[in-house]
Amino acid sequence: MGEDGIWHTAPAYDYTFSVDPSAPGYMNCHSMTINNKNADIERSDLLELAKRYNIKGADAIIEKVISVLGNYEQYAETVGVSPYWTRKIKEEIEYRIGNMTDISYHRGLQ
């Protein structure tokens, strides 16, 4: 939250992948800790974090991010990301979006 009392997106490094072609594969992925987890992060983890920090409209924010990420391939092509990395990052995005549709959300228990 900025000094103006409005939530803003985090710096871009929170969203980017660390890529070092000479590094082992496990290092070439997105790494960010949410709710003390850096893998298998689910919608419930994000909603718990939002509740803890009194972030209003968390579900709408999650849906907006999912919607924007649906256009990842277009953004990647526009800025010249190689087809190899576009595919790798898209796979990671799809995996993470899959975790945003966990069972508690579908049951309306958000």
Image (cartoon, rainbow, N blue to C red):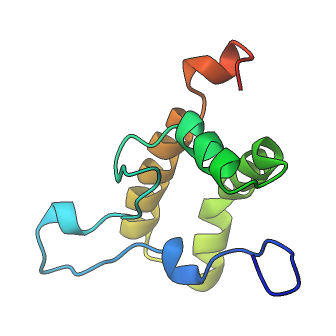
In the displayed orientation, state which residue is furthest to the top: 107
Which quarter of the rendered picture does the N terminus lie within? bottom right
Q: Give residue 89's position: percent from left, percent from top.
A: 44, 60
Q: Give residue 47's position: percent from left, percent from top.
A: 65, 41
Left or right placement of residue 34 versus residue 110 in this view: left
Which one is in front, 81 or 34?
A: 34
Residue lying at 69% horizontally and 45% vertically, measured from the top left: 51
Left or right placement of residue 99 versus residue 56 in this view: left
Which one is in front, 24 or 76?
A: 24
Left or right placement of residue 7 versus residue 105 in this view: right
Left or right placement of residue 6 versus residue 104 in this view: right
Residue lying at 69% horizontally and 12% vertically, measured from the top left: 107
Residue lying at 71% horizontally and 48% vertically, measured from the top left: 62
Image position of 105 with respect to 18: above or below: above
In the displayed orientation, state which residue is furthest to the bottom: 3
Image position of 58 with respect to 106: above or below: below
Q: Give residue 27's position: percent from left, percent from top.
A: 21, 68
Q: Give residue 9's position: percent from left, percent from top.
A: 71, 74
Residue lying at 50% horizontally and 51% vertically, measured from the top left: 93
Which one is in front, 69 or 78?
A: 69
Which one is in front, 39 or 54?
A: 54
